[in-house]
DNA sequence: ATGCTAACCTGCGCGC
DNA sequence: TGCGCGCAGGTTAGCA
């Protein structure tokens, strides 16, 4: 489900309900996530939330004495609920807050994770991540330099978190289409000019998706349970065989690294 | 260093 | 209706 825009949407949605409130209790209904939920999670109880932010696709809940890192994996979501509302299937963790509300972590596939960290920025899963795509550090010059000598397909390269974070399958497909670059082209074989276009399109597609509240394919909902509206603006993702919105020829699907890639053989070279 | 594979899970849509 | 199959927004460990 969630790529950067969906995580950002979730972050903005939950922040007002968490910030300056205390996590009074933590209930773990199923701790078998991507990484087993550690008993350290109970250190959250009594902690004041100072802020909620995002790094890559991790939500960072900053506390007075540490932090909680939440990753939504493929199917995770966070919802604010009233304690009286019945639990939904796959509500694995419930955080009761001092404002009387509950934050519930739901994740059917359990690829997500919920971690305690004393110093989140140096956590092994965070340390070593590449720059944020919406920050200035992610520039054409940076991407071009990183790509020198790399034979990896550009799509795979874009989705490599040590190069740049937050670009998942949907938006990698979209940015490449918008830039007219074949997803199969070797990363090291792209001119600076085209890298400029690519970086610019990665930024703009992510920004536009955030404005629309993310992309809902089947089950993404924000913290209020509402879907995102970017799906109707997708050019290629999920449109295999349908006409290219630019040249009308049918879009082609291939698999790269176990992920589906959809592109236009005419418009993308 | 780079690059590829399998693995972690449940649910849904499709063809038969 | 039901069943089996393939596929799904992510990321890591492990091995060549």
Image (tube, coloured by chain):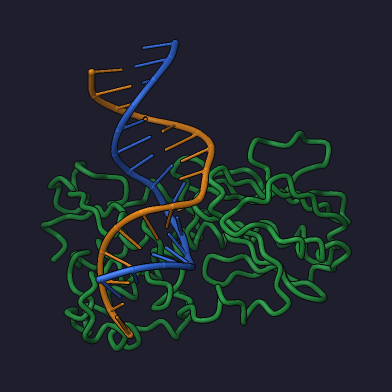
Chain colours: A green, B orange, C blue
Q: Position of residue C7 (x, y in %)?
A: 32, 43
Assign the C terminus of chain A to one quadrant of the image: bottom left
Please determine whether, in this image, residue A248 is positioned above or below residue A114. above
Instruction: Tell me which corner region of the image, top left, top right, bottom left or bottom right, holds residue A193.
Output: bottom left
Relative to A177, A203 lies left or right: right
Q: Residue at x 67, y 50 (%)?
A: A105
Instruction: Tell me which corner region of the image, top left, top right, bottom left or bottom right, holds residue A250.
Output: top left
Q: Residue at x 49, y 78 (%)?
A: A129
Q: Position of residue A85 (x, y in %)?
A: 78, 35
Please determine whether, in this image, residue A138 is positioned above or below residue A78. below
A196 vs A122, nearest the viewer: A122
Q: Residue at x 85, y 67 (%)?
A: A47
Q: How many marks?
A: 0
Instruction: Tell me which corner region of the image, top left, top right, bottom left or bottom right, holds residue A126.
Output: bottom right
Relative to A123, C12 lies left or right: left
Q: Position of residue B13 (x, y in %)?
A: 36, 30
Relative to A59, A252 lies left or right: left
Relative to A105, C15 lies left or right: left
A170 vs A126, nearest the viewer: A126
Q: Residue at x 21, y 42 (%)?
A: A242
Q: Position of residue C1 (x, y in %)?
A: 44, 10
A189 vs B5, nearest the viewer: B5
């Amino acid at each position: 489900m969630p790529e950067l825009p969906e995580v950002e949407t979730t972050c903005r949605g939950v922040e007002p309900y968490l910030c300056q409130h205390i996590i009074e209790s933590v209930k773990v209904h199923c701790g078998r996530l991507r990484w087993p939920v550690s008993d350290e999670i109970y250190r959250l109880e009594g902690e004041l939330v100072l802020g909620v932010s995002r790094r890559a696709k991790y939500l960072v809940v900053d506390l007075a004495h540490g932090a909680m890192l939440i990753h939504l994996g493929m199917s995770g979501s966070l919802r604010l609920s009233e304690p009286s509302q019945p639990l939904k299937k796959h509500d694995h963790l419930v955080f009761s807050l001092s404002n009387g509300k509950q934050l519930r972590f739901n994740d059917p596939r359990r690829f997500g994770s919920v971690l305690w960290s004393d110093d989140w920025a140096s956590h092994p899963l965070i340390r070593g991540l590449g720059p944020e795509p919406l920050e200035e550090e992610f520039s054409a010059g940076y991407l071009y330099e990183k790509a020198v000598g790399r034979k990896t397909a550009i799509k795979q390269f874009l989705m490599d978190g040590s190069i740049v974070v937050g670009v998942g399958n949907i938006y990698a497909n979209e940015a490449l289409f918008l830039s007219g670059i074949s997803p199969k082209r070797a990363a090291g074989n792209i001119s600076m000019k085209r890298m400029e276009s690519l970086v610019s399109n990665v930024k703009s597609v992510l920004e536009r998706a955030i404005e629309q509240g993310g992309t809902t394919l089947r089950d993404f909902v924000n913290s209020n349970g509402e879907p995102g509206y970017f799906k109707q603006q997708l050019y290629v993702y999920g449109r295999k065989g349908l006409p290219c919105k630019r040249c009308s020829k049918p879009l082609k699907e291939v698999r790269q690294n176990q992920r589906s890639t959809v592109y236009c053989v005419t418009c993308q070279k």
